[in-house]
Image (spheres, coloured by chain):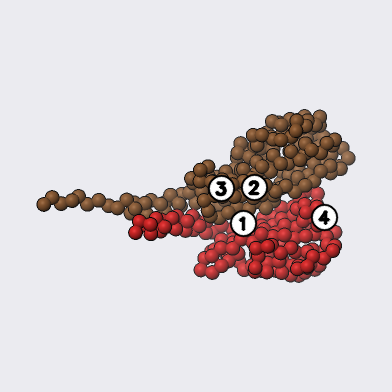
Chain colours: A brown, B red
Amino acid sequence: MQKKPSRRHPSAFFVCILPFCALLLGGCASQTTHQGMTPEIIDTFNKKYSHTVSLGITGGKQTESTGTPQISDIEFKQALLDAINKSKIFSGVIEGNAGEYLLTVTLFNLEQPMIGLSFTVKMEAGWTLKRISDGVVVWQESIESEHTATVGDAFAAVTRLRLATEGAARNNISQGLSKISKLGTI
Amino acid sequence: MLKIRLVFNIFLVFALLLLSGCAVNRATATVTPGMNFKNVKSFYVMKQSNDSRGIEKLISDNLVKRGLRSSYGSQPTQVDAVVTYVDKWMWDMTMYLLELTVTVRNPSTNFPMAEGNSFHTSLTRKSPEEMVDEVMTNIFNKTE
């Protein structure tokens, strides 16, 4: 009688490989990028102010390799700058405080889930638009935004969390510029 | 049998994902530029709807310890700032406070004036009182 060749059950292989995959994925949080945070479409109702603006971003954090994806001041500033240039809502963005207006965005309350298949990230940012010449705050508002990334967006949890975080920032920028466009005369 | 193995595998992945961040500590504070805290003397701590552990009382008590006026429960008519918070709990043998974010807001506009955040995973866990104290200390250090 011929002996049936023995075959290891495939699940034993997965039991061995999965922890290593998980360790790798869990320990490699990636920084959010300005490309991911720049909105494609910004509803500014074709409003174009003939003033220049300078940008000030605070409250951002650097991503630690063992932590969760964070939003850094530099990346958020670049995303906001790209969005302003794309929408042309201001005539130009000036480095430092040399613009006619100063747009300050303070990043608060980044709420990220610990676990799950769909990751919904919520964030809040305090937006302030100040006229430099007389120091008058022409607009100040707290803007809340969120974005959900699913397994369809990315299988790896760290990537999914980064995409959800970038999406929340992207929506925040989009809302902020949209609200500025509705101010009328500034 | 296959289902049990699948569940086990999924559990293993999640457990390891959690364990891989077991020594993360973070304590930060952010203050909106130009905010003046010198005149902020009275606070109202707004209870988070999901909180059943009385964090609002701990925050309020901490403010009182610092010589400030603070209340929770029914909202007083006039205060200098409203405090909101988000507490995240995790289980590792016992429940512990993983992350606490406290935001101090302008009572009339709801605009955030300052925010503090502490994040301590299981191995470096702190009691809720210690977490509250750490967050509030960071906020007040930043506003000085």
The kind of residue tagged 1 is Arg
Q: Are marks 3 and 1 in contact (CB under 8 Å)?
A: no
- Asked if A35 appears above or below B105 in the picture, the reply is above
Q: CA distance from mark 3 to mark 1?
A: 19 Å
Instruction: Find disc 2 in the rendering and name its residue.
Output: A146
| Res. A89 in view | no
Chain of the residue under the numbered disc 1 shown in the image: B
Chain of the residue under the numbered disc 3 shown in the image: A
Mark 1 or mark 4, which has the lower sequence index?
1
Instruction: Find disc 1 in the rendering and name its residue.
Output: B26
Instruction: Find disc 4 in the rendering and name its residue.
Output: B108
Q: Are marks 4 and 3 in contact (CB under 8 Å)?
A: no
SS at circle 2: strand
B83 and A66: which is toward the camera: B83
Q: CA distance from mark 3 to mark 2?
A: 12 Å
**Whether labels 3 and 2 share one chain:** yes
Outermost residue, left direction? A1
Mark 3 or mark 2, which has the lower sequence index?
2
Q: Position of residue B119 (x, y in %)?
A: 61, 59
Instruction: Find disc 3 in the rendering and name its residue.
Output: A161
For discs 3 and 1, the disc positioned in front in the rendered view: 3
Chain of the residue under the numbered disc 2 shown in the image: A
Chain of the residue under the numbered disc 4 shown in the image: B
The kind of residue tagged 4 is Ser
Q: Residue at x 57, y 43 (%)?
A: A163
- Asked if B45 appears above or below A115 in the picture, the reply is below
Q: CA distance from mark 4 to mark 3?
A: 34 Å
Q: Residue at x 41, y 52 (%)?
A: A18
Disc 2 crowd rating (10 Å Cα; few below 14, some 14-19, many 20+) is many
